[in-house]
Amino acid sequence: MGVEDTRDRGYNPWKQGTFHRRLAGQRPEEGVEPVLTITPGAAEAIRGLLAAVTPPDAAIRISPASGEGERWDLAVSEEPAPGDRVVCDSDVELLVAPDASSKLDDKILDARMEGGRVQFSVEPRRG
């Protein structure tokens, strides 16, 4: 069962996306900041990575990397794992692992090109 959006505001990831059908109970609330802010550069990098992936409804999932410190794994995922949150920001959907959600509050996901490769970074939100 899809989510009907009666507002005319252009892009609506919950109407046009795919994960909302599987996680309809996790619709973003009006006026609530997402767990993680996705910059336009990171959104462009995510769209570029997903454009080359099959199936077409795959998403990027962020989870804590093993080891010490705040390091993150980003991987293509065909399905959300149990407990994943869906963050919709900058016209992309990002899956956030349950054990990453609280650590990513008030953070920004950014991306830049380094040596011909996309490098993602997670930084504190300023302001």
Image (tube, rainbow, N blue to C red):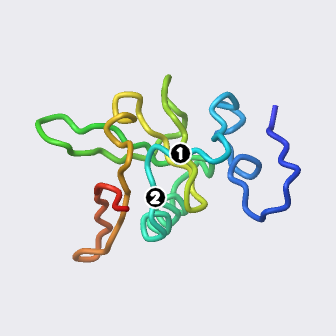
* Residue at left offset 31%, top offset 38%: 103
Of pointers 2 and 1, the one earlier in the residue sequence: 2
Helix, strand or loop status at disc 2? strand
* Residue at left offset 23%, top offset 39%: 65
Q: Nearer the viewer, residue 116 or 109?
A: 109
Instruction: Tell me which corner region of the image, top left, top right, bottom left or bottom right, holds residue 23.
Output: top right
* Residue at left offset 47%, top offset 60%: 46
Judge whether 114 appears above or below 47 on screen. below
Give the amino acid type for the residue marked by disc 1 in the picture.
Val
> x and y percent of residue 74 in the render?
35, 48
Helix, strand or loop status at disc 1? strand
Give the amino acid type for the residue marked by disc 2 in the picture.
Ile
Q: Label 2: which residue?
A: 38
Q: Kindly identify which numbered label has been placed on residue 75.
A: none
Judge whether 3 appears above or below 108 on screen. above
Whether residue 120 sits left or right of residue 22 in the image: it is: left
Crowdedness near tag 1: few (<14), some (14–19) or many (≥20) residues, C-alpha within 10 Å: many
* Residue at left offset 67%, top offset 31%: 22
| Distance between the alpha carbons at the discs numbered 2 and 1 | 9 Å
Q: Label 1: which residue?
A: 87
> x and y percent of residue 102 in the render?
36, 34
Crowdedness near tag 2: few (<14), some (14–19) or many (≥20) residues, C-alpha within 10 Å: many
Whether residue 111 sits left or right of residue 55 in the image: it is: left
Confirm or deny contact between disc 2 and disc 1 (CB under 8 A).
yes
* Image quarter in which the N terminus is found: top right
View extreme (left): residue = 68
Q: Nearer the viewer, residue 32 or 64?
A: 32
Q: How many marks?
A: 2
Q: Nearer the viewer, residue 51 or 66?
A: 66
> x and y percent of residue 89 in the render?
55, 56
Whether residue 63 sits left or right of residue 22 in the image: it is: left
> x and y percent of residue 127 in the render?
37, 62
